[in-house]
Image: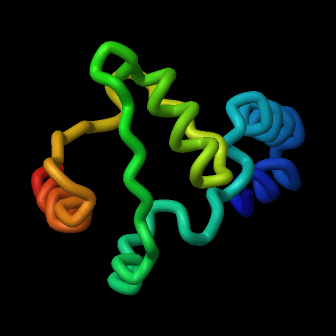
Amino acid sequence: MGLNSIGLLFFFVPGVIAFAVDFINGTIYLPPYEYGIDDPNSQDVELKSVSIPPDQISPDEVSLLVSQHSGRKVILLPGEYETQPIESIDEFWSVGRKMNVQS
């Protein structure tokens, strides 16, 4: 935003274009503070296990269930997420850490 402002001061048209592109793409806003932070205290959060019948598992169904239970809008786009099967909710944090190390 700072660079866009400088561009707006010195080069009005490119600055306006930069702001327009950022607003159109939704990139002018910063994500919430907690977004993407690997907080070691997050393991203290109580997890809830939700079962989905195997014939109903789809990205849309998972998005809907996670959104309902977390209170946040979740959209799973192809290529933007990874999955890993777990046998019980107790494996969640260890599998999650392994996935973060691999990526």
Horizontal and vertical percent position of residue 67:
60, 42
The front one of 63 and 97 is: 63
Question: Which residue: 51% across, 33% down?
Answer: 63
Position of the N terminus, as image quadrant, is: bottom right
Q: Residue at x 18, y 41 (%)?
A: 84
Query: Residue at the spot x=67%, y=52% of the render?
Result: 71
- Apparent side of residue 95 relative to residue 17 in the rendered image (left or right): left
Lateral position of residue 91 relative to residue 18, left or right: left
- The picture quadrant where one finds residue 55 is top left
Q: Can you tell which quarter of the image residue 101 is in?
A: bottom left
Q: Is residue 28 left or right of residue 80?
A: right
| Quadrant in the rendering for residue 77 | top left
Closer to the camera, 41 or 53?
53
Q: Give the image location of residue 56, x and y in percent.
A: 39, 17
Inspect this view and state whether residue 72 appears.
yes
Q: How is the image coloured?
A: rainbow
Q: Is residue 58 left or right of residue 1?
A: left
The location of residue 91, given as percent across then percent down, is 17, 61
Residue farthest to the top? Answer: 55
